[in-house]
Amino acid sequence: AACAQVTCQMVAEAMGIETERIEVTVTGEMDLAGTLGISEDVPVGFESIRTSFDIVAPEATDEQLENLRDKTEEYCVVFQTLANPAELRTEWA
């Protein structure tokens, strides 16, 4: 949530949108039966992730807020990594 909040704040400032508050909440759904090894049919990890923004920007237009949303998603490193997974490697020493 911190990455999305900071990204949204930086984008808002760059766009000249004055905000009084930007709060971000991230929630997810997962079935622990996969993580705990109880069921091989259940995947390990999150099945869905939701990010909710509560933004107070009294002077912003609907169009500005829509652009803010789009740019926040475009530039948020965590959002982009989840949407477009990076190559993952592990090394054991």
Image (tube, rainbow, N blue to C red):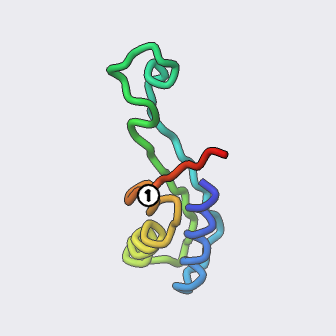
Residue ID for mark 1:
87
Q: Residue at x 54, y 77 (%)?
A: 11
Image coordinates of residue 66 in percent, x first then y, are 39, 71
Image coordinates of residue 60 in percent, x first then y, are 49, 77
Farthest front residue in view: 93
Farthest top residue in view: 38
Q: Is residue 8 above or below residue 24?
A: below
9 sits left or right of 15 in the view = right
Image coordinates of residue 29 in percent, x first then y, are 44, 33
Q: Residue at x 59, y 53 (%)?
A: 1
For the image, the number of numbered tags is 1
Q: Depth check: 23 or 59 in front?
A: 23
Residue type indicated by callout 1: Glu
Q: Depth check: 9 or 63 in front?
A: 9
Q: Which secondary structure lies at badge 1? A: loop
Q: Residue at x 55, y 48 (%)?
A: 90
Q: Is residue 14 above or below residue 50?
A: below
38 sits left or right of 23 in the view = left
State the image quarter where residue 62 is shown.
bottom left
Q: Depth check: 20 or 76 in front?
A: 76
Q: Is residue 41 above or below residue 85?
A: above
Q: Residue at x 44, y 54 (%)?
A: 82
State the image quarter where residue 85 is shown.
bottom left
Disc 1 crowd rating (10 Å Cα; few below 14, some 14-19, many 20+) is few
